[in-house]
Image (spheres, coloured by chain):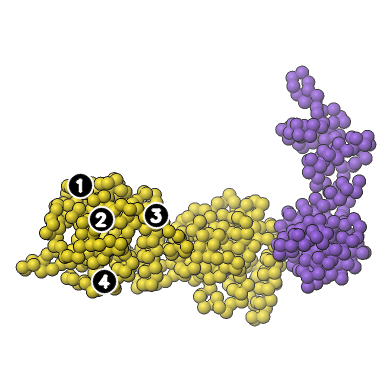
Amino acid sequence: MLDVPVATLRTWEDRYGQVLPARNGSGHRLFSRSQVEQLRFVRARMSEGASVADAYRLLAEQADSGAPLSAFPAGPVPRMLIQLAESDPYAAEFEEYFLKTEGFEVEVTLTDSAAREAFAAAMPAVVIVEVLISGGTGLDLCRFFRAQDGVAIVVVSPVEAMDAAFDAGADAFLRKPIDPLQLVSTVRDLLRSSALLGR
Amino acid sequence: MVGDRLLSGHQPLDEVLGGGLPGNGISIIMGLPGSGKTIIAQQYTFHNATQDRPAVYFSTLSEPLEKIVRFGQTLDFFDAAAVGRSVFYEDLGQVADRDGLPGVGERVAEVLKQRRPGLIVIDSFKALRALASDDGAFRQFLYRLARRLTAFPAASLWVGEYGAGEAAVAPEFAVADAIVELAAVTLGQREQRFLQVRKLRGSGFLPGQHGYRLIPQGLRLFPRLADLPATGSYPLDGQRVTSGIPALDPMLGGGLWPGSATLVAGPSGAGKTLMGLHFMYGGARHGERGIIATLQENPSQLSRLLEGLGWPGGDPAVDVMYRSPVDIQVDEWVHDLLHAAERTKARRVVIDSLLDLQMASLDDTRFREFIYSLMQRFSRQGITLLITCETPGLFSAEGRLTEFAVAHLSDNTIMLNHHRDHGTMARSLAIVKTRASSHDPDMQPFTIGHGGVSLGDITQRAGPPATASANR
C-alpha cells in the first residue's frame, strides 16, 4: 500500500518511536487509518527529498501543532529556480542539464554583471557561483548574494576554496568537476533546510 | 577509482603510474598496432565500470566496434553480463561519417549527460584527425572536447596508434594529463615489449622502460628493477655461512657473509655450476632454503648432474627455477625470481649464468643497474647470492674480469681456470677478491669427481651429503 517493506517500517518504529501499530492476537501489525495517513505523509516528504529523520521530525512538529495532515498535500513540489553563475559554458551546460532533469528550473548566467541582473529579475531559491567567474570575482558575487534575502548559495571551484567560500557567506562548497549526484543532493539539502527554517 | 586515481586492477601497473592514471584527466595510450592498447583500455574499462559510474567505450574509424567486442571476449576479464549494464560500447564512426568532428563532440557530451560515466574510452582517437579539414579545425575540436571532459568528473582514455615521433607534434599530447607508451624493441630476431610513462601531470611515476606481456588476463607488467632510494641501513648478520665446500671456507676467511654476493667466473667446463650446487646444497644441509635460478640446465639435466655427483633426488629445501634463455625478458625473469624467493623464504640464491641474462638484456648500462639492484635487494634481505659467469677462451680469463658488469659490484670473486698439467687439463681456483674479509691468495688445484669438488693441497672431500661442514 505504501511501498515500504515491513522490515523498514519496523526499523522506523524502533528508531523514531512514532506511528506504532497495534498487534492482533497472532502478533500481526494493525495500522489504523490515521497511522496510514501519517506514513503517507512521511513518504511524501521523502519523495520531495527529505531524509527519513527530517520527515519524521516534520511529522512530529505537525502533530504538536495540532494541524490536520491534509494541510500538507503529498503532491509535487512547486518548481524551484536555480541560478547558475558559471564562468565555463561547458560546465554550465552539464549543471543545467542535471538540475533540469531533476525538475528544477535553471537560469544560466556567464558573467558577474549578467548574474546580478538576472538575480534581481528572477529571484532564484539557490544560486551556484563559480569562483573564477569574470576573471575571479566569484567570492565578491557570493557576498553580494549573501546580502540579499532568502537565497541559498553554493560556491563551486576547481581549487580548494572551502574556507574562503564560507567566509564569503556560502552555504555549501563543491569542488569541480562536479559530480551530478552531489550537485543535485546539495541543492536539495539547501532547499529542504531553508524550507524548515522558513516555517 | 580510488581518490582521484583511476586504477587498472593490475597492481604493478598502478605502482609504475605512481598510484594510477588521473581520475579526472585525459590519458593517452599510444603504441603501434599490436602493442596491446585496446587490451589495456578494456582492462581499465571492466575494472572500473559500475552501474552508478559506468564505462563507455567509443570506437571510431579505425576498428569496427564488433571486432573490438568480439576480440574482447577472448580476454579473461571481459564480463558479458556487464555489457549494457555497466559497460556500454558505442560506435562514434557513424556519427563521425555523418556529422564530422562537431557531431563527435556533441555525441560525447550527450553520452556524458545520459550515462554519467566514470570512464570513457575513445579508440582510436588518432583516427579522428582524418576527419578534420585542416589543423585549425582539429585543434578547435580538441579544445572543445577537452573542455567538456574537464567539466565532467570522468577519466578518459584516448587510444591511438601514434609513433614516438608524433608525441612531440600532435596537439592532443599537449592536452593530455598522462601519456603511456607501449613499445616493442627488436634485438636480432627477438622482440621485447616495454611500457613507458611519458607524462603524468601532478604525480611521480617510475621512469624507464618496464617489460610487459599480453596474456588472457590482460597486460602483465614487470616494473624495471631499480634500487629504492633512501633505503637506510639494514642489520648485518655477524655469522658467516658455508660456501658448501668445507675446504674453501677457510680460504675465504671463514665462509661467506650472509647477504653477500659471490661471483664465480671461469671458462666453459671449469666447474662453475658445480660450485653453485655445492653452495646451494651445503646451505640446504643446514636448513637454509634456496633457489637455483638457472638458464643453463633444465630440471632433467640438473637431476642427471646431481646423480652423477652421487646426490640423487636433490633436497626439498632447494627449488629450481628454470627458464629457457630463448625469449626471456629480464624484467619478467627477475620478477619471478624475487617472487619465488619471497614465497619460499629462500636464504640462498644461485644465478646460473650471468652471461645468459646479459644476452637477454637489451642494453649494457641497464643490465648493470639491474644486477646492482638485484644484489642490493638480496643483500638487504640477508639472502646470500652466488652468480656464475662464463669467461671467454678456455684458459685464464685473468685481467678480463672487469669486462663483466658485476665483477666490481660483487663482494667476492672466485676465478676458476683450466691449466695444462703434464699434458692433461687440470683445474684450479683462486680467490681474487673478498670484501670485508681477508682471503687466501694462493691458487688451488682442484678436481671434480663423485662427491663434487675436491681441493688440491688442502684436500678434503666435500659436498653434501658426504661430509658435514663446521663452518657455520
| Chain letter for mark 4 | B
Q: Is there a contact, CB below 8 Å, between mark 1 and mark 3? A: no
Disc 4, SS:
helix
Q: Which residue is denoted by mark 1 in the rendering?
A: B468
Q: Is residue A25 left or right of residue B408?
A: right
Task: Indicate the amino acid at tag 3.
Answer: Pro
SS label for mark 1: loop
Residue situated in front as seen by the camera: A43 or B363: B363
The CA span between labels 1 and 3 is 28 Å
Q: Which residue carries the number 3 mark? A: B235
User: What subunit carries mark 3?
Assistant: B
**Chain A visual colour:** purple
Q: Secondary structure at mark 3?
A: loop
Mark 4 and mark 3: Cα distance apart in space: 30 Å
Q: Residue at x 38, y 61 (%)?
A: B376
**Residue under numbered circle 4:** B401
| Mark 4 crowdedness (10 Å alpha carbons): few <14, some 14-19, many ≥20 | some
User: Could you say whether the residue bearing mark 2 is in a helix, strand or loop?
Assistant: loop
Select label 4 or label 3 by which is in front. 3
Left or right of B227, for residue B347: left
Disc 1 and disc 4 in contact, CB within 8 angstroms? no
Instruction: Find the distance from the CA under tag 2 to the CA under tag 3.
Output: 19 Å
Ranked by sequence position, the earlier of labels 1 and 3 is 3
Q: Are marks 2 and 3 in contact (CB under 8 Å)?
A: no
The image position of residue B129, as x and y in percent, is 61, 75
Q: Quadrant of the N terminus of chain B?
A: bottom right
User: Nearest the camera: A61 or B439?
Assistant: B439
**Mark 1 and mark 3 on one chain:** yes
Front: mark 4 or 2: 2
